[in-house]
Image (cartoon, rainbow, N blue to C red):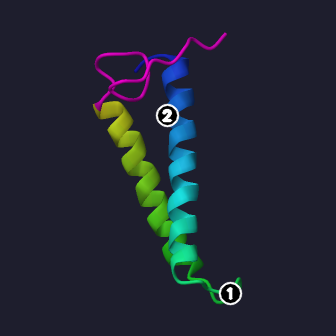
C-alpha cells in the first residue's frame, strides 16, 4: 500500500469507477444532454470512486496491487 504502483493502480481504478457509475446513471434514464441530472450522477460517481479507493486500501494487505488477487508491477 505504500508503493507508487499501488496508488497509481488505485487512482486508475477510482477514475474508471467514477466514469462507469456516472455513465450508468445518465444512461439508465436516457436523458437528453441538457435534461440530465448531472449533479446526482456526479455525486453517485464520486461516492463509487471513494468506495473503490477504500476497497483498495482494505484489500491491500497481501500484495502490491489494490486488490486481493492483483499484483502491480513497480513503476520506474
Please identify the residue farthest to the bottom as the structure is shown. Answer: 35
| Left or right side of 64 for 18 | right
Closer to the camera: disc 1 or disc 2?
1
Number of numbered discs visible in the structure rendering = 2
Is residue 14 left or right of 62 when viewed as pictured? right
Q: Position of residue 29 (x, y in %)?
A: 53, 83
For the point 61% across and 83% down, the residue is 36
Q: Is residue 50 magenta?
A: no
What is the magenta segment's predominant secondary structure? loop
Where residue 55 sits: x, y (%)?
33, 39
Query: What label sits on residue 10 in the rendered view?
Result: 2
State which quarter of the image contains the C terminus: top right
Q: Residue at x 49, y 76 (%)?
A: 40
Which residue position is annotated with label 1? 32
Region in magenta: 59-76
Per the image, label 2 sits on a secondary structure element best described as: helix
- Residue 64 counted in the magenta span: yes
Q: Is residue 17 above or below residue 30?
A: above
| Badge 1 vs badge 2, beta-carbon distance below 8 Å | no
Which label sits on residue 63?
none
Rendering coords of residue 34 (x, y %): 70, 87
Amino acid at each position: 500500500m505504500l508503493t507508487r504502483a499501488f496508488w497509481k493502480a488505485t487512482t486508475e481504478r477510482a477514475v474508471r469507477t467514477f466514469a462507469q457509475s456516472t455513465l450508468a446513471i445518465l444512461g439508465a434514464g436516457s436523458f437528453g444532454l441538457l435534461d440530465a441530472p448531472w449533479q446526482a450522477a456526479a455525486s453517485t460517481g464520486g461516492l463509487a470512486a471513494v468506495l473503490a479507493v477504500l476497497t483498495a486500501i482494505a484489500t491491500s494487505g497481501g500484495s502490491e496491487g489494490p486488490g486481493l488477487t492483483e499484483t502491480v508491477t513497480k513503476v520506474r
